Image (cartoon, grey):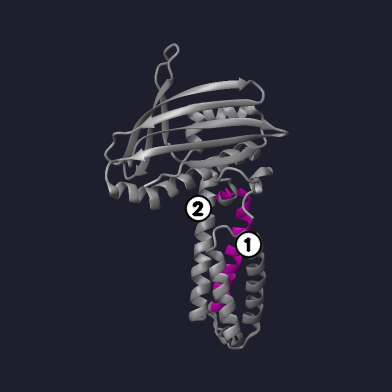
Amino acid sequence: MKRKPVYVETTIHAPIEKVWEYTQNPKLHEQWDLRFSTISLNETRDEQPQTFLYEKHLGFGISVTGTGAYRTRVMDERDKRASSLKFKSSHPLSFIKEGGGYWKYMKTNDHIVFQTQFDYETKEGKGWKWADRFFFRPMIGFMTAFSFGALKTWLEKETHPRLLLERTLAHYGICLLFAIVWLCQAIIPFSHSAFDHSTGFRLFYALLGVLWLIPKLPKKYLFILQSIFLLMMLCIGILSPETTLHEPLVVSAFFILSIAGMINLKDCVDVFSIKRKRGGRHGRSSSPSKGLR
């Protein structure tokens, strides 16, 4: 089964020295990279690669550990640097047996192109290989993309990665909630206003629900559309003689959540704007970080 290496690239509007420091300093590195919880360097030896121990906390007191070694290379102090890495793990819960990859830093105009590519072998057995192909490798790719986006935002806007993670998780939670609400509303309306029962509105609710489930769809204008519609529903509900007491309260709660979700966008990591393939142009990640849209 042919493996596809994980490739991630982003642009960062910051000095190359600062990007280098935040990626090569273990105490800073472990704050933005979701793949590691702690990184501990071993004593260095002349002419030998720098070795380290890493640990990833899985929760409930369970952790996966491993070892690695890396070398750094400065081709041009101001414009181009790189580091190569090898890693392995014998931990029983680790699906990775061993692997390797690199980081590259290239100054272009007013920003730094920061890219990585790595590959690894899983433990023996077809089960591990199939699990890696359909679950672990996509998950690692997503975590790496988020981490690069978090680093970009941290350096450009000084928003800590932990806060970015919390707000990004809140964003996807809100998207899932609204998807469920609108799809349920298409089947069983939660308001008894006359227009809620028409086929046209039910199709509109179903469309809204589906749109919230599309990960790559920018959500800014969807929040605006939804907020306007909820405000209209709230006004009609208040004026309608058929309205029960709980309906304006429910619609008001969703309206407030919609506004809060829109405000939260600026402090989220847009994972799907991070470049995941070689070649082509950058998406929204080529401009200074502006959060999700």
Q: Main secondary structure of the magenta part?
A: helix
* Spatial CA span between label 1 and label 2: 17 Å
Q: What residue is rendered at 52% in x and 57% in y?
A: 172
Task: Return the mark for residue 259.
Answer: 1
User: Closer to the camera: disc 1 or disc 2?
Assistant: 2
- The amino acid marked with disc number 2 is Leu
Q: Residues within 10 Å of mark 1 (few under 14, many from 20)?
A: some
Question: Which residue bears the numbered disc 2?
Answer: 169
| 135 falls in the magenta region | no
Depth check, front residue: 59 or 240:
59
Which secondary structure, mark 1?
helix
Is residue 172 shown above or below 56?
below
Q: Is residue 63 above or below residue 232?
A: above
Residue 74: x and y in percent read 58, 21
In the figure, 130 relative to 98: above or below?
A: below
The quarter of the displayed image where residue 155 is located: top right
Residue lying farthest right? 109
* Segment colored magenta: 247-271
Q: Secondary structure at mark 2?
A: helix
Q: Residue at x 33, y 38 (%)?
A: 64
Q: Is residue 17 visible?
A: no
Judge whether residue 266 is colored magenta: yes
Label 2, residues with CA under 10 Å away: few <14, some 14-19, many ≥20: some
* Left or right of 189, for residue 56: left
Residue 53 appears at what percent x and percent y?
37, 27
